[in-house]
Image (spheres, rainbow, N blue to C red):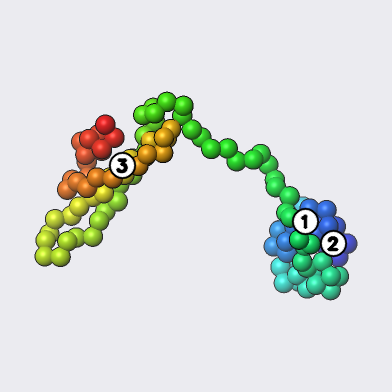
Amino acid sequence: MISKILYLRERYHFGPGRIASYLQRFHHLTVAISTVHRILIRYGVNRLPANQTRRPIGRPWQRYEKPQPGHRVQVDVKFLERIAGTRKRLYQFTAIDDCTRIRVLKIYDACNQASAARQSG
């Protein structure tokens, strides 16, 4: 088991939590994270060298973006605190254009479809 822990640390630069999960999932060995950490300390591999980082898994992240302004607009609604002395509830509508990343904020006293259409239009 110790050789598997050291192999995973050297080869994949896994931390104690990921090593414990890997051993449980693929080798059916239940080991506490603290035990894995103690083993890494004992063999002097508890810290990765500054020039070694964890290797990324999977595809690199890519931002979704439309090429034409106004083609996709995201609208979010937030309830605002009531103004002291009034019973009226206000709503903040935020619209963000996907292409230009321009943000527009407006305050409405109604949270309905008409308010959202006025905001995004």
**Residue for point 46% across, 29% down:** 66
Q: Label 2 near label 1: C-beta < 8 Å?
A: no
Left/right of residue 97 with respect to residue 45 in the rendered view: left
Instruction: Check residue 6 in the rendering and tell me which mark sits there, or answer none.
Output: 2
Q: Quadrant of residue 28?
A: bottom right
Where is residue 113 drawn, in percent x and y? 23, 37
- Judged from the image, the secondary structure of the residue bearing numbered disc 2 is helix
- Judged from the image, the secondary structure of the residue bearing numbered disc 3 is strand
Task: Pick whichever of labels 1 and 3 is earlier in the sequence.
Answer: 1
- Judged from the image, the secondary structure of the residue bearing numbered disc 1 is loop
**Residue for point 17% across, 48% down:** 109
Pick whichever, 47 or 110, lies toward us: 47
Q: Quadrant of residue 95?
A: top left
Alpha carbons under labels 2 and 3: distance apart: 53 Å
Left/right of residue 55 with respect to residue 7 in the rendered view: left
The quadrant of the image that shows the C terminus is top left
**Residue for point 41% across, 35% down:** 100
Where is residue 87 drawn, in percent x and y? 12, 59
The residue that label 1 is drawn on is: 52
Where is residue 59 drawn, in percent x and y? 66, 39
Q: Label 3 near label 2: C-beta < 8 Å?
A: no
Q: Amino acid at mark 3?
A: Val
On screen, residue 86 above or below 120: below
Determine crowd level at label 1: few under 14, some 14-19, many 20+ residues with C-alpha closer than 10 A: few
Task: Pick whichever of labels 1 and 2 is earlier in the sequence.
Answer: 2
The residue that label 3 is drawn on is: 104
